[in-house]
Image: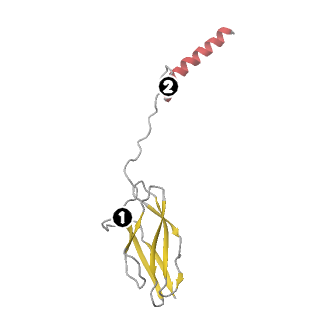
Amino acid sequence: MLAAATGVVGVAAILLGWVLPLLGEGDGNGSPTSRPTPAQSVSPRDDSVFEGDVTYPDGSVVKQGAAFDKVWRIRNAGTVPWQDRYLTRMNDTPCKAPERVGIGPVLPGETVDIKVRVRAADSPGRCKIFWKMTDDDGAPLLAGKKPIFLDVTVG
């Protein structure tokens, strides 16, 4: 009985010494070995996600000539930190707004609230201003993304 138990333990030790190195758990001498890992993508990816209107959702009514702050929330969904970026106005409307407003800096995964000061038109109507992300030189970024916009009714 003792001989059988010793034989089983011996066979188990041999198998364990043979299998562990194949699993990357050790080298058979008690030293750990590393497992190969799949290569990770290292190319940077620039991306954004529109999180929502913080103030003045689409269709809001504003008084003629009133000044108000429009705020959007955007998340940096890429792997590239945002530095020296802007929202640049893409069209003209009776409502007045700056040509561009600063964004950030924003690290990957972070959200940012972007505020633009707007002055409503002096007469009733619809005011829709489109904005795209640009760099410091005004070159468009995130070309595949639709513009964000302000859409209010002046009444």
Asked if residue 126 is positioned above or below residue 86 in the image, the reply reads below
Asked if residue 122 is positioned above or below residue 28 in the image, the reply reads below
Element under label 2?
loop
Query: What percent of the width, then of the height, locates residue 60?
Result: 54, 80
The figure's colour scheme reads secondary structure
- Residue on which disc 1 sits: 141
Total of numbered circles in the picture?
2
**Amino acid carrying mark 1 in the image:** Leu
Image point 62% across, 15% down: which residue? 8
Query: What percent of the width, then of the height, locates residue 134?
Result: 35, 66
Image point 38% across, 67% down: which residue? 86
Residue nearest the observer in this picture, 75 or 39: 75
Res 130 quadrant in image: bottom left
| Upstream in sequence: badge 2 or badge 1 | 2
**Amino acid carrying mark 2 in the image:** Gly
Estimate how packed mark 1 is, as few (under 14), some (14 to 19) or many (20 or more) residues with alpha carbons within 10 Å.
some
Picture quarter with the N terminus: top right
Residue found at the far bottom of this picture = 123
Query: What percent of the width, then of the height, locates residue 155?
Result: 52, 88
Residue found at the far left of this picture = 137
Asked if residue 64 is positioned above or below residue 24 in the image, the reply reads below
- Residue on which disc 2 sits: 26
Element under label 1?
loop
Could you say which disc has been placed on residue 54 in the image? none
Image point 52% across, 24% down: which residue? 19
Residue nearest the observer in this picture, 101 or 32: 101
Query: What percent of the width, then of the height, locates residue 81?
Result: 40, 56
Q: Marks 2 and 1, Cα distance to the nearest angstrom?
A: 49 Å
Residue nearest the observer in this picture, 18 or 32: 32
Image point 50% across, 25% down: which residue? 26
Res 91 quadrant in image: bottom left
